[in-house]
Amino acid sequence: MTSPVYTRTPVIAAGASDLVSPRVLNDLRLMSTLTLLLSFILAGVALIYANDADQAFKYPAPFVGVGIGFALWIEGQAGLRNLVRVDVFMLMVLFLLTFFEFILPQDSITDRVSLPAAQTAVQATLLGFTGIVVGRHIFPANRPLPRRIDFQVSPKGTTILLIACGLLGYLYMLLAVSFDISEMIYQMTRPRFSQPWTRGRFGSLSTLLNEFGLLKYLIPPLAAAILAQWRKYKLWQVAIALALLSLVFFEGFAGGTRNIFLIHLITFSASFALMLPRLTFSKLAMIFAPILVVAYFAIYYLPEIRTVGLENFNIEESRTDTLFVDMNLINIAHLTEVFPETHPHLGFEVPYVAAVRPIPRALWPSKPEGLSLSIEEAVGARGLTLSATFVGELWMAGGYMAVLMAALSFGALSAYWNRRAVGARSNLDMIIFAVALFPAGLGMRSFMSLAPTLLPLLAIILYTKVVR
């Protein structure tokens, strides 16, 4: 295979004022870590004064939120590019999934969760935060961070990869509607699980095509790379990027799954910001201001869209007085009452089942269907799917120790991957870095869902190895 044509733009010669030394980066990271640990300690102290489950969730939330805010401000002293990191993203996602909704007014949950269970859930979650911020020091910064850089751009390679992801990613949908694009878009607006391409419980050879659907998650960062440096691309290449990006966003929004839609927004905005030669506050505001508005709308309304479908959605009928995310802290609290009080910890069953999930059932018919005791079964929920973040799932595996070990691993892996962004010199290098935000974000929501999300990342790494 011939190598893609690169638009060679010289890397900006960085003087002393244009580089942030590794020592400064590590010092700032240490300061932010100490700030975060202090906020977690204060949150733990606030937890002691809680008299019911409402207060147990509400009192610690502001301390964690303010701590993350101060940590971002500290690390931002090295430049805004220093904030576009995997560990920072993990902390923000975990906060959104746990404490964020309890900063806002919520209906009372005292009749649903006991105080001891709520306190244990908060302690386990704070331990998860602690593990991430400590674990990221296992791989300290080892090279200076450029404040500004111009990447070597591969218009041909980026466009080919984008088109391939679009064709393969939507192939299973197109086959289900006989390649009628208008019908495919209409089916996207229908209620969840009513589409003709909905995956069955047990896989077959035909459902192997569904696995290619994961390639859709590469489209937002690829499209962002094209749009951020649109002058280096032809008009038809930009048009294709806009069309595929619009389709992915529409599908994510119409599907009503908030974590998927928000991940699309994040990977797009992160890739766009990183591909800018010089990232300034004004540019960052222009990127993230509309993204935040769309994200808030998505968090607020997508649960209703997921239930009734976009075609039946009425914004007036869907208004509520509270902002509901996932109430993951409640689910974690219920799990702490089950494990190990009424059911022993699942141990290595959790990482084992998580690791084999990407293997198609058509190739392994006897593959485990899931955990011997699912979250839903453990908490007595029927007819719905619950999430409990990686904290709840690892609590099922082994309590506090399992949560801590997983969090330390997440922190260490994020720090190791951040080194890739510092060393990136081409747009494909930076796209690979941005794609990792997809498994990082979903890994915070569900450790059990982490392994399949690594497949798109492995695919793009393999692509770059082949074409270079």
Image (cartoon, rainbow, N blue to C red):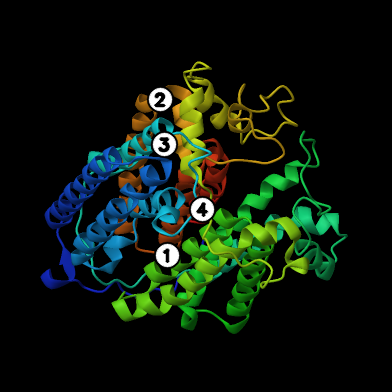
Q: Secondary structure at mark 2?
A: helix
Query: For the residues carrying marks 2 and 1, which lies nearer the camera in this image?
Result: 2
Crowding around mark 1 (Cα neighbors within 10 Å: few <14, some 14 to 19, many 20+) is many
Q: Nearer the viewer, residue 289 or 9?
A: 289
Is 174 left, or right, of 106 in this rendering? right
Q: Secondary structure at mark 1?
A: helix
Which residue was labeled with disc 4?
A: 107
Mark 2 and mark 1 in contact? Answer it, CB < 8 Å.
no
Query: For the residues carrying marks 3 and 2, which lies nearer the camera in this image?
Result: 3
Under mark 2, the amino acid is: Gly
- Measured in 3D between alpha carbons, the distance from the residue under mark 3 to the one under mark 4, in whole angstroms, is 15 Å
* Residue 395 shows in the view: yes
Under mark 3, the amino acid is: Ala
- Measured in 3D between alpha carbons, the distance from the residue under mark 3 to the one under mark 2, in whole angstroms, is 15 Å
Which residue was labeled with disc 2?
A: 399
Is 75 left, or right, of 47 in this rendering? left
Which residue was labeled with disc 1?
A: 270
Crowding around mark 3 (Cα neighbors within 10 Å: few <14, some 14 to 19, many 20+) is many
The first of marks 3 and 2 along the sequence is 3
Q: Which mark is residue 118?
A: 3
The first of marks 2 and 4 along the sequence is 4
Q: Measuring from the top left, give residue 328's x and y in whole percent.
A: 49, 43
Q: Secondary structure at mark 4?
A: loop
Under mark 4, the amino acid is: Asp
- Quadrant of residue 164 in the image? bottom right
